[in-house]
Amino acid sequence: MSGFIALDWGTSSLRVARIAADGRVLAEHQSAHGILNVPAGGFPQVFADAVTPLAPQAGTLCLASGMVGSRQGWLEAPYCPCPAGFDALAARIAWITDAPGDLRVGIVPGLSTVVRGVPDVMRGEEVQVFGALQLLGLQDGTFVLPGTHSKWVTVQAGRITGFSSFMTGEVYAVLRRHSILGRTMPDEDPPADDEALLRGVLNAMQAASLLHSAFSARTLALFSQLAPEQGPSYLSGLVIGEELRAQRLENSGVQPVLVGGQALTRRYELALGAIGVRSRAVHEQATWRGLHGLAQALEH
């Protein structure tokens, strides 16, 4: 397989890399042109501007994962149902027929599953999971991708068999910015406070639900038991703790693999450790490794 260009094209940002045939990242850069920042009809030009610095030749393979394949993106790529591996994703790549520069541009479809009769979906995280599998040399495991909509993913024999989404990051943002809880906290988030984070995690694990535990962010501040600068970390701990409580990990033997940015995965490592669960983390390189594996699957 020759080298290719990889694009991690999400809602708020766009990352681009030139990947060698052996998987090495030769060059990469990032811009703020996530899909919400692309004007109507502007995807071809944003794509061209992003890949031109990497000097691709005509016919070069370009693989894009993330929300660029959503209904609001460049081209909607229908979801691939679970269970799914590299072969299933490769078979459902959506190809751009009029790509700039005569490049071979494919969009990764994302995955869908059904939980208790209700559909669940993800775009981009599936590539990160497959990349983490390759980086760690695994075929099975539980993978956690923290974020606005956190994902808990089950992998068996190298195939994603199912997953569940949790609106942890979005609920935090709503409570932080659009509820009375945020009025006791600074306008800008201070540095993370590990002690306050863990206090929130443990409170959430013992409470009946987040609807009950969330109010403690107000009452602890009201009785001067939580400093204003500790509020954001405490609230973060509450929503992360609620997410963990739903997993019932105690005495399960599960050792999750965390996939994502270092700051956020560290919070989950701390939270999991507080309830006696060991974990390990893989960071941003998982996306590039996953797209490299998908490129190899296409070649074969």
Image (cartoon, rainbow, N blue to C red):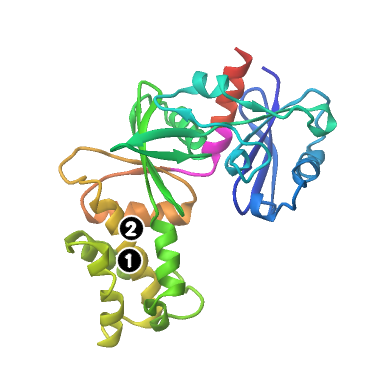
Q: Position of residue 294 (x, y in %)?
A: 57, 24
Where the N terminus falls, by quadrant? top right
Relative to 211, say whether 106 is above or below.
above
* Local SS, label 1: helix
Badge 1: residue crowd in 10 Å (few <14, some 14–19, many ≥20): many
Q: Residue at x 43, y 58 (%)?
A: 169
Asked if residue 288 lies in the magenta stretch, the reply is yes
Task: Return the residue nearer the eye: 202 or 102.
Answer: 102
**Where is mark 1, residue-wise?**
197
Of label 2 and label 1, which has the lower sequence position?
1
> How far apart are the two marked residues, 2 and 1, measured between alpha carbons?
9 Å
Q: Quadrant of the C terminus?
A: top right
Reading the image, the residue beneath label 2 is: 240
Viewer-nearest residue: 281 or 201: 201
List x then y, in percent, for residue 92: 57, 23
- The amino acid on which the numbered mark 1 sits, given as a three-letter code, is Leu
